[in-house]
């Protein structure tokens, strides 16, 4: 009797929650495997690019600029460059991966499966966030070769990276959903993401700008992420940290809701 009961428990179908968890981990594991399989394209290029930034801007140009807000110019640009690499790689990973699945008709298999939309979105976003974190750690290690890196506020640092990577992962997902060809995936990073990052206070303090430019910068979401991360590493910020976190949480909620709605309706996904 007891043995029959144990066999019944062992062969019982998994619960919905367990099935969703397994599906989430499967999508995430596939994304991580993809990142590591083509590491020469996903991890090496940002490391080389950021090394050149540190050499040219931090070493050559920074030595002539002097201090910035009480820190050496090299120390000042480290948070911005780390955050910039996290944002760009999180966005690029999910936009290319999900559009590739849509282009190859793999996404239709996900849509007809019993997986709810949040599992599909969560798996892809988790993979993109992990790539952003991996690249961020690599860039931070490279920065340690050029200057001393302190982390006086580790929780703020980690929270900023996670929220920033999540925001741009969700934005990359929306881009991939609406993209109809591979050129559409490259338009947003080239004409929107790159200007936002370069004008987001990565290489300068907003206080150096004229009044109109300083006001305009406050409409740039990347500006708040960079400054929150700068506060985590250096303890200084051009904006109150609570405002930066409030805006980041707002963008996560808004883009997450939009992504779930797009999956639920099948916008741009169903033939």
Image (cartoon, rainbow, N blue to C red):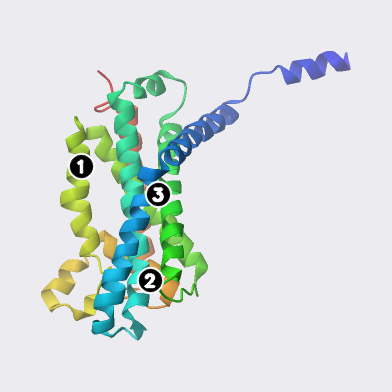
Compared across the picture, whether 246 is left or right of 198 comes to right
Separation of marks 1 and 3 at Cα, in angstroms: 19 Å
Kindly tell me whether residue 263 is visible in this rendering.
Answer: yes
Compared across the picture, whether 7 is left or right of 146 comes to right
Separation of marks 2 and 3 at Cα, in angstroms: 23 Å
Residue topped by disc 1 = 186
Taking the view exactly as shown, the residue that stands out farthest to the right is 1
Which is in the foreground here, disc 2 or disc 3?
3
Q: Residue at x 31, y 44 (%)?
A: 92
- The numbered mark at residue 230 is 2
Along the line of sight, which residue is nearer the eye, 105 or 113? Answer: 105
Compared across the picture, whether 231 is left or right of 23 comes to left
Please tell me whether mark 1 sits on a helix, a strand or a loop: helix
Q: Which image quarter holds the C terminus?
A: top left
Residue topped by disc 3 = 43
Separation of marks 1 and 2 at Cα, in angstroms: 28 Å
- Residue 205 position within the rendered picture, expressed as x and y whole percent measured from the top left: 25, 76
Give yes or no for contact between labels 2 and 3 (Cβ–Cβ under 8 Å): no
- Residue 28 position within the rendered picture, expressed as x and y whole percent measured from the top left: 48, 37
């Amino acid at each position: 009797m007891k043995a029959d009961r144990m066999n019944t428990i062992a062969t019982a179908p998994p619960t919905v929650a367990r099935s969703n968890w397994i599906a989430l981990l499967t999508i995430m594991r596939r994304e991580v495997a993809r990142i590591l399989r083509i590491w020469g394209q996903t991890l090496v290029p940002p490391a080389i690019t950021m090394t050149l930034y540190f050499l040219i801007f931090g070493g050559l140009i920074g030595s002539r600029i002097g201090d910035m807000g009480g820190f050496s110019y090299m120390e000042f640009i480290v948070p911005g460059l780390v955050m910039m690499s996290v944002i760009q790689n999180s966005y690029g990973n999910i936009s290319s991966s999900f559009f590739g699945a849509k282009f190859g008709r793999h996404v239709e298999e996900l849509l007809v499966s019993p997986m709810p939309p949040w599992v599909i979105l969560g798996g892809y976003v988790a993979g993109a966030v992990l790539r952003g974190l991996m690249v961020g750690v690599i860039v931070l290690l490279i920065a340690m070769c050029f200057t001393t890196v302190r982390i006086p506020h580790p929780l703020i640092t980690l929270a900023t990276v996670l929220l920033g990577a999540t925001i741009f992962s969700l934005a990359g997902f929306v881009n991939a959903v609406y993209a109809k060809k591979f050129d559409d995936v490259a338009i947003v990073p080239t004409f929107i993401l790159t200007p936002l990052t370069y004008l987001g206070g990565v290489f300068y303090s907003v206080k150096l700008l004229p009044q109109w430019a300083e006001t305009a910068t406050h409409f740039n979401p990347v500006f708040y992420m960079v400054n929150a991360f700068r506060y985590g590493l250096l303890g200084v910020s051009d904006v109150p940290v609570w405002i930066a976190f409030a805006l980041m949480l707002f963008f996560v909620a808004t883009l997450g809701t939009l992504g779930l709605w797009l999956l639920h309706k099948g916008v741009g996904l169903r033939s």
